[in-house]
Amino acid sequence: MQEIANKIDFGYDTLDEAFPLCDAGVTPFGSRVLCQIRTPKHKTKGGIILTSDVRETEHYNTQVAKVIGIGSLAFKNRNTMEAWPEGSWCEVDDFVRIPRYGGDRWSVKTADGDEAIVVIFNDLDLVGKVTGDPLAIKAFL
């Protein structure tokens, strides 16, 4: 099953397809960052319908997310509340690498009735800002 998932071309046409509009229903407190994980497709670019196992594997191995909310203390010194000298590492609508495990995760409905997964991380838990195409980053098993 893992070898099959590695070879599938999920072929998202747009960023909106991979990260559909959703309301997480939460505003992050303090130094937390709210992210939306890339949504697995129901079928491949070639039209093959994906099983729930393949979709679940893709979902849990995805480490690319879109920032959809930032707490008021994120990227600030916790003692002085001043911004970090290097500034914020990311802003809302940026794409970031996230840890595979951790964070507080839950699902919400998207505007088209599909399901999106959102997660809250501490600002220090984010791995890095995606500077290239976020759709080009593949999950590895």
Image (cartoon, helix red, strand yellow):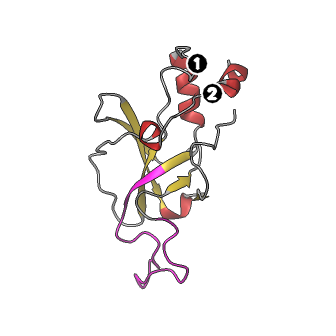
Considering only vertical position in the picture, is 38 above or below 50? below
x then y, percent, for residue 130: 58, 56
Q: Secondary structure at mark 2?
A: loop
Q: Amino acid at mark 1?
A: Gly
Magenta span: predominant SS is loop
Q: Amino acid at mark 2?
A: Asp
- Quadrant of the snapshot with the C terminus: top right
Residue at left offset 59%, top offset 43%: 100
Q: Residue furthest right?
A: 3
Confirm whether the magenta stretch covers residue 81. yes
Q: Is residue 33 left or right of residue 86?
A: left
x then y, percent, for residue 101: 57, 43
Considering only vertical position in the picture, is 54 above or below 94? above
Mark 2 to mark 1 CA distance (whole Å): 8 Å
Q: Secondary structure at mark 1?
A: loop
Mark 2 and mark 1 residues within 8 Å of each other at the beta carbon: yes
User: Residue tagged by mark 2?
Assistant: 9
Residue at left offset 52%, top offset 34%: 12
Residue at left offset 63%, top offset 44%: 137
User: Which badge, 2 or 1, comes first in the chain's sequence?
Assistant: 2
Dividing the picture into quadrants, the one containing residue 44 is top right
Dividing the picture into quadrants, the one containing residue 6 is top right
Q: What residue span does the magenta drawing correspond to?
A: 66-90
Q: In this rendering, does residue 102 appear at all?
A: no
Q: In this rendering, does residue 71 appear at all?
A: yes
Mark 1 Cα-neighbour bin, 10 Å: few <14, some 14–19, many ≥20: few
Count of residue discs: 2
Confirm whether the magenta stretch covers residue 37. no
Residue at left offset 50%, top offset 80%: 84
x then y, percent, for residue 133: 59, 50
Looking at the rendered structure, which numbered label has been put on residue 46?
1
| Viewer-closest of 102 and 23 | 23
